[in-house]
Amino acid sequence: MKVIIVVPTNREKTIREFLKSWETEFASAHIFVVEDNATRSFDLGDCSNVTHFAWEHIDHDLGRESWIIPRGSDCIRSYGYFKAYSECPDLIITMDDDCYPTPDQTHFIERHWKRIQMGGEREAWCATGTGTISRGVPYFSRTRNWPCVINHGLWIDTPDYDSPTQLLQNRNSFEFIPINQTIPVGMYFPMCGMNLAFLPQVVPAMYFLLMGENWKYHRFGDIWAGIMIKKICDHLGYVINSGEPWVSHRRASNIWDNLSKETPGLRVNEEVWCAVDRIILHGDTFAECYAEIARELTLSCWYWTELKKAMSIWAGLFAKT
């Protein structure tokens, strides 16, 4: 099986620790390290299965359209998806550089692959009351198994909380317990990019949005991308599974920096999913549906105008192939 792992970073020490920790598990995979700097500022030449990118590669490949890959943000990883797609892999996995194997971790890639291959069972019939089921409901065939295209892996140790919750955690006791589930039709979920596996056909809609340097918002790129991809999966008849395999998350970011970055997006985060949910899709492919969302999204200000341009360009990259 051909697997590509996409990891964004701007921390030499952290990415070296990441590569060392996953050395055995990822021995047969190809790792795309996307460094968030103008040029490669450190050498990973001793890792034979690693390809190391930086801004210069983005600018070379995308030219005038390279602005759609944000800088100063983990969303620079979208470039890794673009490069991975061209390699025609069986599976793409993206991870954060501060995620490590759990103590009992084995067969990480295979476990992601297995959860995608198992699909997801969804209820196809609903009773109209409680108690005895009324006439017309099939006796046996009441569920439907849909193919899965994304497995949202979760984490242990440091939870993926927003910064206000992190601050409250210093005075209160919080607990995050990961579970295995298929995300129900018509429902959204907080998609995190720290441990995410998906099939290449999803890439035309797997775009982590304009965040960070030069943009209004930060740290919502994966969350808002997940809203859009879930809308498309529901329309096209695919499921998203969430749960195993876990990773050990050891937060490397600063809580006060995160609070400053997240604050501008907290209010609009209440509105984004509603705006996406109102869109009626007609497309037959991920690229077509993603272009539809870019055209029909009703949110408006300079940021959303530029984002919709970027989304259209992203979908167009794959319409050409």
Image (cartoon, rainbow, N blue to C red):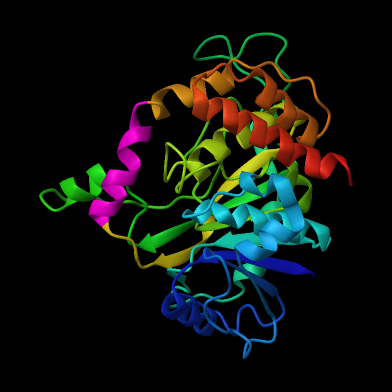
What residue range appears in magenta?
255-267
Relative to 314, is 190 on the left or the right? Answer: left
Residue 114 visible in this rendered orientation of the protein: no
Relative to 60, is 100 on the left or the right? Answer: left
SS assignment for the magenta stretch, majority: helix
Asked if residue 141 is among those painted magenta in the image, a careful observer would answer no
* Residue at the extreme left of the image, as rendered: 171
Q: Quadrant of residue 137?
A: top right
* Residue at the extreme front of the image, as rendered: 64
Q: Nearer the viewer, residue 231 or 52?
A: 52
Residue 69 visible in this rendered orientation of the protein: yes
Q: Is residue 152 above or below residue 188?
A: below
Q: Nearer the viewer, residue 106 or 90?
A: 90
Q: Is residue 169 above or below residue 140?
A: below
* Quadrant in which the N terminus appears: bottom right
- For image coordinates 82% across by 34% down, the residue present is 285
Relative to 102, is 264 on the left or the right? Answer: left
Q: Nearer the viewer, residue 61 or 245?
A: 61
Q: Position of residue 158 (x, y in %)?
A: 32, 61
- For image coordinates 52% across by 18% down, the residue present is 300
Q: Nearer the viewer, residue 38 or 252?
A: 38
Q: Quadrant of residue 254?
A: bottom left
